[in-house]
Image (cartoon, grey):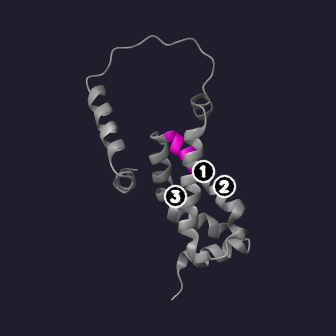
Amino acid sequence: MDDPTAELVRRTQRGDHAAFASLYDRHAKLVRAICFDATGDAAAAEDLAQDVFLRAYQGIAQLRDPQRFVAWLCEIARRAGRDWRRRPRRERTGELDVLPVPDVARQPDDDRVTELQQAIRALPAQERLALHLFYL
């Protein structure tokens, strides 16, 4: 029995745009989780995931083994995350030159959120990815 993902890849390689939309639907959550692991920010992860799928769409014709699509897509996502982390912060966030915003009172849960984020970052990569997959 043939892998449905591989068949969608072959259809995409033949120009079927709906097949790529199905690939997106099947794998977007995984890609977003990998991107979130790299960025730590949901909005940045979503933007990065869109870039990953654009790269995948542009390069899918060169994918020789459709059975390896998921591994290939994950590698694109990991590389995109690595590239994102290497960019200067200003470029990553698209910051504008603005006046500084005065500090507002911290919410009581801010410290707990910070502690939780630090604890998640300290987890091994596989466990972090599992958490991101579950909660995103």
Distance, label 2 to label 3, CA atoms, is 12 Å
Q: Position of residue 89 (x, y in %)?
A: 57, 30
**Dot 2, how many residues are within 10 Å of its Cα: few (below 14), some (14-19), or many (20+)?**
few
The residue where tag 3 is placed is 28
**Dot 1, how many residues are within 10 Å of its Cα: few (below 14), some (14-19), or many (20+)?**
some
The residue where tag 1 is placed is 50
Q: Amino acid at mark 2?
A: Leu
Quarter of the image for residue 22 reads: bottom right
Distance, label 1 to label 2, CA atoms, is 6 Å
Label 3 secondary element = helix
Query: Is 128 one of the magenta-colored residues?
Result: no
Q: Indicate which disc, 3 or 1, sits on the residue closer to the N terminus.
A: 3
Q: Which one is in front, 78 or 60?
A: 78
For the point 74% across and 71% down, the residue is 15
Label 1 secondary element = helix
Q: Does residue 24 lie above or below 40 as drawn?
A: below
Q: Position of residue 53 (x, y in %)?
A: 62, 56
Q: Position of residue 115 (x, y in %)?
A: 28, 33
Q: Which one is in front, 22 or 113?
A: 113
Label 2 secondary element = helix
Which label is found at residue 54?
2
Q: Amino acid at mark 3?
A: Ala
For the point 33% across and 14% down, the residue is 105
Residue range of the region highlighted in magenta in the rendering: 43-51
**Dot 3, how many residues are within 10 Å of its Cα: few (below 14), some (14-19), or many (20+)?**
some
Q: Is residue 107 left or right of residue 64?
A: left
Is the Cβ of the residue at disc 1 closer than 8 Å to that at disc 2? yes
Q: Is residue 126 left or right of residue 82?
A: left
Q: Position of residue 78 (x, y in %)?
A: 54, 54
Q: Amino acid at mark 1?
A: Gln
Q: Indicate which disc, 2 or 3, sits on the residue closer to the N terminus.
A: 3
